Image: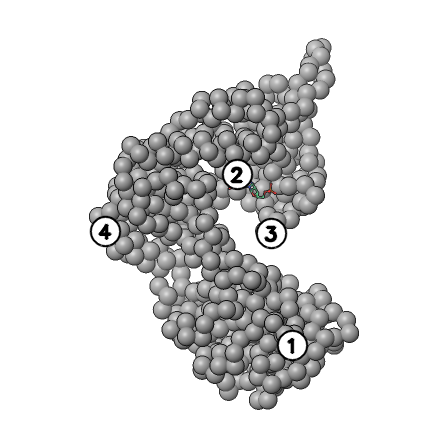
Amino acid sequence: MKKEMVIVIDFGGQYNQLVARRVRECNVYCEIYSYKIELEKIKEMNPKGIILTGGPNSCYEEGAPSYSKELFELGIPVLGLCYGAQLMQFVLGGKVERAAVREYGKTLVSIDNSSELFHNVASETICWMSHFDYISQVAPGFKIVAKTADCPVATAENAEKSLYAIQFHPEVLHTQEGTKMLSNFVYNVCGCTGDWRMDSFVEESIKQIRERVGAGKVLCALSGGVDSSVAAVLLSKAIGNQLTCVFVDHGLLRKNEGDEVEAVFGPEGSYDLNFIRVNAQERFYSKLAAVTEPEKKRKIIGEEFIRVFEEEAKKIGAVDFLVQGTIYPDVVESGLGGESAVIKSHHNVGGLPDCVDFKEIIEPLRNLFKDEVRKVGLELGIPEKLVFRQPFPGPGLGIRIIGEVTEEKVKIVQEADAIYREEIANAGLDRSIGQYFAALTNMRSVGVMGDERTYDYAIALRAVNTIDFMTAEAAEIPWEVLQKVTSRIINEVGHVNRVMYDVTSKPPGTIEFE
Ligand code: XMP
């Protein structure tokens, strides 16, 4: 699977994962490593090319992240981006200085098309710049192949040694021909053939899982989310009913969701695996009775989840492997100061491994980005509805109900949310909005229905657009859609007489409404 690989060396830039993604989009496998990775390890991996990312530091400052000169003498092509470009020049004898003004934003760059990097790129093209320091003098052996009005060295190359330094960010979509430049690097400079495909991933993974598991028993906690679903199907294709999936229905799922998961993975579904659905609604509702504080609710749900899972696991007995749906962004530690490839103990369901008797963990998706996981899901024939599911918090509707959680309130929010989702889909907006859902406020107010006075709940509708879920903007849903959702919710869902749309961004709000 990893015959042909490009590695990204991370200097703490905010776009580090994006670089790897773009390379993979060129069908070349790519992994990210910390700048602390040893040269020996790189030699061992023998990548086809190396890309150095941007970063927040100044390379000439003492203690700034760096790499030894030998990196550039391995005979492996190296592409430095932003900080990586400055570092390459600095280490090889060029000069980097602080500019009087920061160059930031979309910038017109003049390009020398004779460079391999710029093959088929327009001679004037828009690029994304974001830097204070600049390369004031290139290292010996380098020539300048791109510049802007403010930046004398937008790109420098030593074609003979296959070393390239780009001051801007080709990985960012604002750089109009950035993907072409990266593709030129991996194909024309590194000589990659581009054999990384999702179908080869599926095939290879199945082979590897079979070899590793042998006749062993495997346990998977299935949440119905994209990652655990794709992991489960991959495992089931590889080892069939040696796999047992435990799906805990805590009664806080969206409308029909439990049944949908069962329809896909259960006995009537298309996979040959042991599926155990635990209907634990009552247990959860009774534990949550009279609890109003959001953190406390989260804790109760998390703990109860483990308890239920533990009981089921005990019935199954010892297993050899536990499956986790860890994906690449969970693995890569962003920013500086740590090892880049530290495995975060990412427990979707909170500390499961401690309570189950197993020997090893299998994480079949740990090298994939979310969109790649989705591609694998489609490749495996998982229904689109599951593959394109929005993020849904582990504690579920328990944190979309303000105040005490009761069965009645769960029904209200389930119905309202189902109407909202249906209308968003009818309006063709379901793939374009980042995340959207209905929440039940704990507020009741006076209304009038027919001739009668009502005193009922208010539903809050939330919809956000976001890139990384760290920040988010409220989505501008067309007024007619909101009106339709509102009138349907009030007419069709009992005990609701008011619908509100939340226009708060994150920060100061959060995406969830808890
Ligand atoms: P907030 O509300 O913190 O949410 O802005 C950011 C993203 O994280 C999701 N989220 C969770 N996901 N378990 C999860 O698996 C949780 O406990 C949890 N809480 C929030 C949320 O849906 C949003 O996508």
Residue topped by disc 2: 393
| Mark with earlier residue (1, 4) | 1
Q: Look at the numbered discs 4 and 3 and tell me whether their residues touch, using CB distance below 8 Å.
A: no
The answer to whether residue 281 shows anywhere in this view is yes
Query: x, y (%) of residue 67?
Result: 53, 75
Q: Nearer the viewer, mark 1 or mark 4?
A: 1
Query: x, y (%) of residue 418?
Result: 54, 30
Residue for point 34% across, 45% down: 322
Residue topped by disc 3: 467
Q: Nearer the viewer, mark 4 or mark 3?
A: 4
* Amino acid identity at mark 1: Tyr
The answer to whether residue 22 shows anywhere in this view is no
Give the spatial CA distance, label 4 vs label 2: 34 Å
Compare residues 316 and 201 and report the one nearer the observer.
316
Query: x, y (%) of residue 478?
Result: 68, 39
Mark 2 vs ligand 1: CB under 8 Å? yes
Q: Nearer the viewer, mark 3 or mark 2?
A: 2
Which quarter is ligand 1 in? top right
* Amino acid identity at mark 3: Ile
Give the spatial CA distance, label 3 vs label 2: 17 Å
Q: Residues within 10 Å of mark 2 (few under 14, many from 20)?
A: some
Residue topped by disc 4: 214
Residue for point 53% across, 21% down: 289
Q: Is residue 194 left or right of residue 463?
A: left
Q: Look at the numbered discs 1 and 3 and tell me whether their residues touch, using CB distance below 8 Å.
A: no
User: What secondary structure is found at the residue carrying circle 2?
Assistant: loop
Residue topped by disc 1: 60
Compare residues 93 and 501 and report the one nearer the observer.
93
User: What secondary structure is found at the residue carrying circle 1?
Assistant: loop
